[in-house]
Image: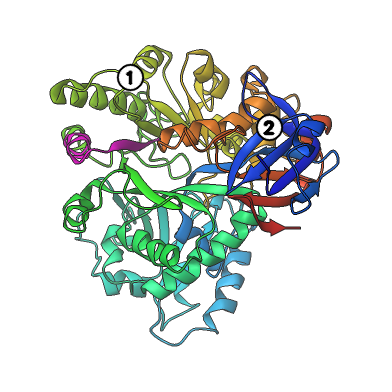
Amino acid sequence: MTVEIAILSSKIFTGDPKIPWAEAVGIKDGQIAAVGKDQEIKGLCSGHTKILNLSSRLVVPGLVDGHAHFCSFGQTLSLVNLKNLSSLAQCRQKIRTAVSTYLPGEWIVGRGWDDRQWEENRQPTRRDLDDLAPANPLMMFRADGHTVWVNSLALEKAGVTKVSPDPPGGKIERDPVTGKPTGILREAIGVLRKFIPRSSQEDLKAAALAAQQEALKSGLTGIHSSEMLPQFEALAELDKEEKLKLRIYHLLRPQEIDALSVRDIKPGSGSPRLWVGHLKLFADGSLGSGTALLHEPYGNDPANQGLSVIPLETLRDQIRRTYAWGGDVAIHAIGDRAVSNCLAAISEARKKEGIGPGEKRDRIEHVQLHRSSDLALFRNLEVTASVQPVFTATDWRQAEEKWGHPRCRQAYAWKTLRKAGISVQFGSDAPFDQINPVLGFQAAVTRQTPEGEPAGGWFPEERLTLEECIEGFTRIPAWTSHRESSLGSIGPGKRADLTVFEKNLFEVAPENWPSIAVEMTIIDGEIVYQK
């Protein structure tokens, strides 16, 4: 056998526990043909073999973001960016500048504001937007994506008034004196959605290509993207046009099952670059918006236990419909009560459908707070915890504020989940956080922000090793997406998907990892990004 490409490096982490390290990889027909010592692979080379001598650069299996919103991420690259601003005044100025680039009547959308970071120390209202764009409806997503801040014109366009009822599972914030909407909508984007012009397929394709460029630069070879049928169809077009380089596992919605059946889209449908299998469901809201569903009240808001965005019986029905379609479920659950509800609903649905052990690869997304009493059922159901390690760095302060220190012992507890025998998959939740997986590595290994806070790490006993982090971005998402035979590690017969870092992360202090760039990203043996 002669290989077409030989990759030589003294630091190849294979992800295979039997042979974790190698010196060289041989590639043929887009697959890994051989893994071993330098001289072994050189012996498979001919005069036509392309040799990549990477010296001591770190090579790992292609990294996969296990939870993102791909087209939305691409779209946010062109939205009004309100992230990391220290005041409401700065937000207003950003929006004011953006308004000048729009025609009267056009919807203006922004993302990323976080009132916890503002020096004004208060929640915004519609009046903070009204003077900025009297002729444009404004809609600004909070950093967590579960709350929107709108102006009076947007409320008027949507017909939202003081007598409008709260939508199912959502809340329209109201002035306690007048009863009028304040402009803050929690878990209630649906009241606006039909009034906002929909993105065309060409718009979605352009957004996907912009997102792909950023993902490849970050070393990602795959994405698990939770969006809807229009986004899937845009990606399918790109796939047909051979413009889709990333592998995208697309999570659709149970509300779309009838439309999927009409199109003959079934679990496993698609191509090596784009396929489906899980459907995405929702059980609660978010930490930042105070809508994550808890067993006990919020520490800073004793009257609040969060929101169940869907009745438990409806959740069970959606799970059963997903099973009848042939798919697995991935359920958004941040609060501990939401996690409990998901596990109970999955267990009941499986019993009713006669589904036995090993037949499903269900997931719970986020699992930011859990109860110890739920871990045995979590393990026995073989449900994967699909989590976002970077949230440990971004959320620890507000988790302490909202949930209290004692309860946070079970928050973002990735080591505890692993010790309980639960598979833990990693993702970014982009665009709600940065798509760079190295930031997830750093947060999971240090339990600190990139600036080193808190000192000593937040519940440092929950720290993970770098090997465990790489597994969360490789082997686990390969398994949950039903591609473990071809993806997830570096071994003969696997697709040649590789991520190459300019330095060896194993030999660099974790606080310095965010400054280490991706040298190249390889998919099917093709260099799709190079620094």
Q: Nearer the viewer, residue 373 or 131?
A: 373
Q: Secondary structure at mark 1?
A: loop
Amino acid type indicated by mark 1: Leu
- Residue 81: % across, % down: 58, 65
Q: Is residue 222 left or right of residue 155?
A: right
Q: Quadrant of the C terminus?
A: bottom right
Q: Nearer the viewer, residue 280 or 302?
A: 280
Q: Which residue is mark 1?
A: 381
Q: Alpha carbon of mark 2 to alpha carbon of mark 1: how far?
A: 35 Å
- Residue at 20% x, 39% y is 318
Amino acid type indicated by mark 2: Val
- Residue at 61% x, 72% y is 93
Q: Is residue 259 left or right of residue 523?
A: left
- Judged from this view, the residue extending furthest toward the left is 352
- Residue at 53% x, 51% y is 430
Q: Which residue is mark 2?
A: 35
Magenta segment, which residues?
317-333
Residue 72 position (above or below residue 342): below
Q: Is residue 429 left or right of residue 156?
A: right
Quadrant assignment, res 20: top right
- Residue 292: % across, % down: 39, 36
The answer to whether residue 146 of the structure is visible from this angle is: no
